């Protein structure tokens, strides 16, 4: 199983006190001191896992918009008041629990034409207020040019436990649909905004998988 490189300090950190407890030669220390640190290291390994997905070997259909994260759909369709960017959009929001894969993927292909980071609060990610009050990173993807260009906006939003956003892309970079582009450390949410001509294909409460579940689809070209 691949482990995201951001996870290694969290995985190896608890092993040092566990090793000291075992090296002490005291059975009680090995049991009551080492075990919690070993359990924490094991959880961090689980949290920072980075499994391959179907999009890594088979590109999604050109009109498909895929989920950027594992989790449960919180919003599907009309955007929450005051949350969407200026303009006319539909919204799909995914809540990530602390046991979901937290590696994020690009929901669509194209060039990153805008990138911004905004500091904010750390409300629980399932609360609707978190969409516009919490710390977040926002990316605009554009495929094509002129009146036929396709634009998708998506946000990494931290939660009450997630205090660090990792965004491994920036303006001018080309992303493929489903390509890894960052992660959020601990429970959080992802918001995706698509134009009204797209068909939203998921519903509230549905579980989705990053890079695999098609959450919306563009009308076929032509």
Image (cartoon, grey):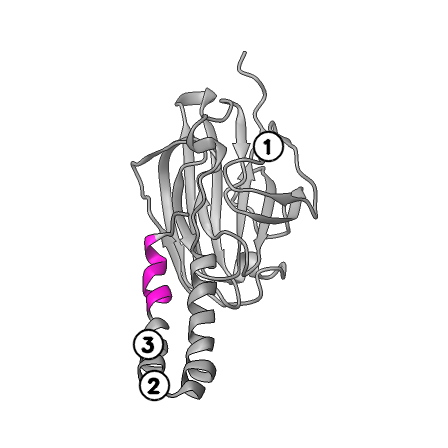
Residue 9 highlighted magenta (yes or no): yes
Name above or below for residue 122 compared with residue 203: below
Q: CA distance from mark 2 to mark 3?
A: 11 Å
Q: Which mark is residue 19?
A: 3
Q: Which mark is residue 216?
A: 1
Q: Nearer the viewer, residue 158 or 183?
A: 183
Main SS of the magenta part reads helix
Question: Dot 3 surroundings within 10 Å: few (below 14), some, or many (20 or more)?
Answer: some
- Residue 162 is situated, as x and y percent measured from the top left of the image, at 47, 64
Identify the magenta region.
5-12
Per the image, the residue denoted by label 2 is 25
- Residue 179 is situated, as x and y percent measured from the top left of the image, at 40, 37
Q: Secondary structure at mark 1?
A: strand
Q: Nearer the viewer, mark 1 or mark 3?
A: 3
Q: Nearer the viewer, mark 2 or mark 1?
A: 2
In the picture, measured across the screen, residue 221 lies left or right of residue 119, that is right
In the picture, measured across the screen, residue 133 lies left or right of residue 33, that is right
């Amino acid at each position: 199983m691949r482990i995201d490189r951001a996870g290694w300090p969290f995985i190896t950190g608890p092993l040092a006190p566990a090793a000291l407890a075992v090296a002490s030669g005291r059975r009680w220390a090995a049991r009551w001191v080492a075990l919690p640190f070993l359990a924490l290291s094991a959880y961090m390994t689980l949290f920072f896992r980075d499994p391959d997905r179907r999009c890594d070997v088979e590109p999604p259909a050109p009109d498909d918009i895929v989920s950027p994260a594992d989790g449960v759909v919180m919003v599907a369709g009309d955007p929450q008041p005051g949350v969407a960017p200026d303009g006319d959009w539909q919204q799909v929001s995914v809540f990530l629990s602390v046991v979901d894969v937290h590696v994020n993927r690009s929901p669509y292909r194209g060039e990153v034409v805008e990138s911004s980071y905004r500091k904010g609060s750390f409300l629980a990610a399932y609360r609707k207020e978190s969409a516009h009050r919490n710390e977040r990173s926002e990316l605009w993807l554009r495929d094509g040019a002129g009146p036929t260009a396709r634009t998708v906006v998506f946000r990494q939003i931290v939660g009450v436990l997630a205090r660090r956003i990792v965004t491994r892309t920036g303006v001018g970079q080309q992303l493929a649909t489903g390509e890894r582009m960052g992660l959020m450390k601990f429970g959080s949410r992802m918001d995706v905004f698509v134009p009204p001509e797209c068909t939203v294909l998921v519903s509230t409460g549905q579980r989705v998988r990053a890079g695999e579940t098609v959450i919306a689809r563009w009308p076929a070209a032509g």
